[in-house]
Image (tube, helix red, strand yellow):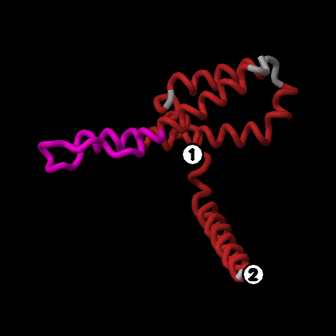
């Protein structure tokens, strides 16, 4: 079972990247719409973007959980690798249809009360990164 989890994780990551590539690309132009994509195609693209974003948010939370708590949880939960394989297989087979309910009903209620704090923290980190980049560019010159 230790071989199955990395294979599932890698295939899920590949499918996420490929689906994002397909979603970001503009739909083909429509002859009836003056060379612009049709409204139906743009609506479908917007729906696909939401699903793709939900998949990436769930994937990032899963990767963060795996990185921080995996070693502790696997000691106390029997058949942990099998359960993790089933979860990865679920995410792999259902894609956005499985990720959107996880995001809407599990992750969003956890994150929503902390949005203001997270926004300000990320703003400080971005400002610090900009300052360090400026400092490095001044030192190099």
Residue hosting label 2: 139
Q: Nearer the viewer, residue 64 or 37?
A: 37
Q: Position of residue 12 (x, y in %)?
A: 59, 30
User: Circle 2: is it few (<14), some (14-19), or many (20+) Cα within 10 Å?
Assistant: few
Residue lying furthest left: 32
Residue drawn where x is 82% and y is 19% of the image: 78
- Queried whether the magenta region covers residue 81, the answer comes back as no
Residue drawn where x is 83% and y is 27% of the image: 74
Q: Which residues are magenta?
A: 20-48
User: Circle 1: is it few (<14), some (14-19), or many (20+) Cα within 10 Å?
Assistant: few
Q: Position of residue 132 (x, y in %)?
A: 71, 74
Circle 1 SS class: helix
- Queried whether the magenta region covers residue 40, the answer comes back as yes
Q: Looking at the rendering, which quadrant does residue 46 occupy?
A: top left
Residue hosting label 1: 109
Q: Position of residue 16 (x, y in %)?
A: 54, 36
Residue drawn where x is 86% and y is 26% of the image: 76
């Amino acid at each position: 079972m230790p071989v199955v989890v990395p294979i599932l994780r890698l295939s899920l990551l590949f499918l996420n990247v490929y689906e994002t590539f397909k979603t970001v690309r503009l739909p083909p132009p429509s002859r009836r719409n003056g060379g612009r994509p049709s409204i139906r195609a743009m609506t479908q693209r917007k729906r696909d973007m939401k699903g793709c974003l939900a998949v990436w948010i769930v994937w990032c939370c899963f990767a963060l959980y795996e990185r921080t708590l995996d070693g502790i949880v696997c000691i106390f939960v029997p058949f942990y690798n099998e359960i993790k394989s089933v979860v990865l297989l679920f995410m792999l087979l259902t894609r956005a249809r499985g990720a959107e309910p996880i995001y809407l009903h599990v992750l969003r209620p956890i994150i929503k009360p902390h949005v203001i704090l997270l926004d300000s923290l990320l703003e400080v980190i971005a400002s610090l990164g900009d300052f360090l980049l400026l400092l490095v560019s001044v030192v190099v010159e």
